[in-house]
Amino acid sequence: MGKDYYAILGIPRDADDDTIKKAYRKLALKWHPDRNKDKSEVANAKFQEIGEAYEVLSDKNKRAIFDQYGEEGLKGRGPMPEDGGAGGFPGGGAAGGFPGGGTFHFTSSGPGGGGFHPSDAEDIFKHFFASFGGGGMGGMGGMGGMGGMGGMDDLPGGFSFSSSSGGMPGGMPGGMPGGGGRRFRQQQQQQSHFREPEKPPAIKRPLPISLEDLYKGAVKRLKVTRKLRDGATGRPVTTDKILTINVKPGWKAGTKIRFPGEGDELDNGQTQDIEFVVEEKPHSTYKREGDNLRITIQLTLVEALTGFHKTIKTLDDRTLSINNTKSVVHSGQESRVANEGMPNSKTGRKGDLLITYQVKFPTSLTEAQKEAVKKALS
C-alpha cells in the first residue's frame, strides 16, 4: 500500500490549489527540522514526506497519475499508462504547478529507470516561500534557472537560506513570463521577509500542591483536554492527554512548568503551550516563610512558668520533641530549630523551623488561687 498524499496533508481528494497550499504551509512550518531539533529524525522524515505530497498534488500531471495509479504507479513501481511522455508521464519530465509560476524539475533518467523521484524537501520549502513577498518572481522571463536571486532570509519561524548563482535544481525551461529585467533587478536589490505570526500565548492553569508534597517531592499526573485539527476534515476535535509533572522538593508558589505544544491547535496551524503555575495549599499546622517553616505552640500559664514537653509531627511524618524546663516562656517568644525547615530546590539545604509560643492565661482566679500566686511569686 503506497503513501496517501492527501492524508499526509490532511486534505480531501477534491481539494483545490489554495487548500493544498494552505495545508502544506501549516505542516511545513510545524515540522521543519529547525523547529524540531529535539526530535530531528522524526521531523526530517515528516518534513520530506510533506514536501513530497505537496510536490505531487500541486502538479496537475503528477496528481492525475497519482489519483489513477497511486504512489507505485507514479514512481514507476506499478502499472503505468501506455501513452505519455518520458518514463510514462504525460507531458515529459518537467513538473510544474508551484506557486509563483515556476516549475520544479525531475528527470526520468538515472539508476532505477523511469518514474517520479521526489525533490529535496528543503528545496521545495524555499521555492514555496520564495514565491511570496517583495520583488516578485515575474521578472525572470527567458532565464534558464533561478540564478542570481540574491539573499532571502527571515522565513517564517526564523528559517533562512540564500541562493547562489547556480539556480534551482533542473532549471526553469522557458523562464517565467512578465516583467522583464527591471523587476528581476528590483528583486536582487531587496530582501524578502516572511514572518510567522507571533507565538500564541500559553494556556495557564493553576497547580495546587500540598506543603507535604512540596517538602518531600511528588509525581503528579494531570489529564488535560485539548483541541486539535482533524487531519482529514480540518475540523477541531477534542482529545485527552496525561501530562506528568515531577514536583521537586522545595518548589515555591509561582514556580512555572511549561509543556511546549501540548495546548490547543489554532486555525493558523500553531499550537499553544500549556503552563502550570504552582499554588501552595494552606496547611493546618505549618506556615511557609521562604525556606523556613513557622509553627505556633499553645502553652498554659503553668507550662509557661514551670516548663513543658511537646511533640510535633513533621511534614515527612517524623516526630520532633520540644522541651523547656529551665526558663519562663513569654507569650510571643520564639525559638529556632535548625535544618527542620523547607528544602531549597536549588541547593538541597533546609531552612529552619521557627516556633512561636502563645501563652493562654486563665480567664479568672479564685481568692485561694490568687493568694497562692502571690505567695509563690513574692
Image (cartoon, rainbow, N blue to C red):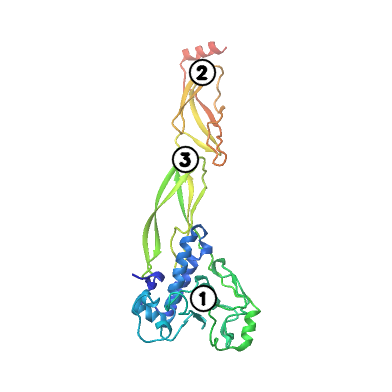
Three-letter code, disc 1: Phe
Residue type indicated by callout 2: Gly
Residue to which mark 2 is pinned = 307
Query: In the rendered image, which quarter contains the C terminus?
Result: top right
For the N terminus, which image quadrant? bottom left
Mark toward the start of the polypeptide (1 vs 2): 1
Q: Is any part of residue 362 visible from this angle?
A: no
Q: Nearer the viewer, residue 13 or 107?
A: 107
Q: Are marks 1 and 2 in contact (CB under 8 Å)?
A: no
- Disc nearer the start of the sequence (3/2): 3
Q: Residue at x 53, y 76 (%)?
A: 127
Mark 1 vs mark 3: which is more N-terminal?
A: 1
Q: CA distance from mark 1 to mark 3?
A: 50 Å
Q: Nearer the viewer, residue 171 or 134?
A: 171
Which of these two is toward me, 113 or 206?
A: 113
Of the residues tagged 1 and 2, which is closer to the observer?
1
Q: Residues within 10 Å of mark 2 (few under 14, many from 20)?
A: some
Amino acid type, label 3: Gly
Could you tell me which secondary element the residue under label 1 belongs to?
helix
Q: Is residue 61 above or below residue 239?
A: below
Seen as rendered, the residue at the extreme top is 375
Could you tell me residue 322's position as x and y percent?
50, 23
Point out residue 327 in the picture as x, y percentages from the top left corner.
Answer: 56, 18
Q: Whole-Å distance between the Cαs marked 3 and 2? A: 36 Å
- Local SS, label 3: loop
Q: Secondary structure at mark 2?
A: loop
Work out whether 213 lies above or below 129. above
Q: Which residue is mark 3?
A: 217
Q: Which residue is mark 1?
A: 128
Asked if residue 178 shows in the view, the reply is: yes
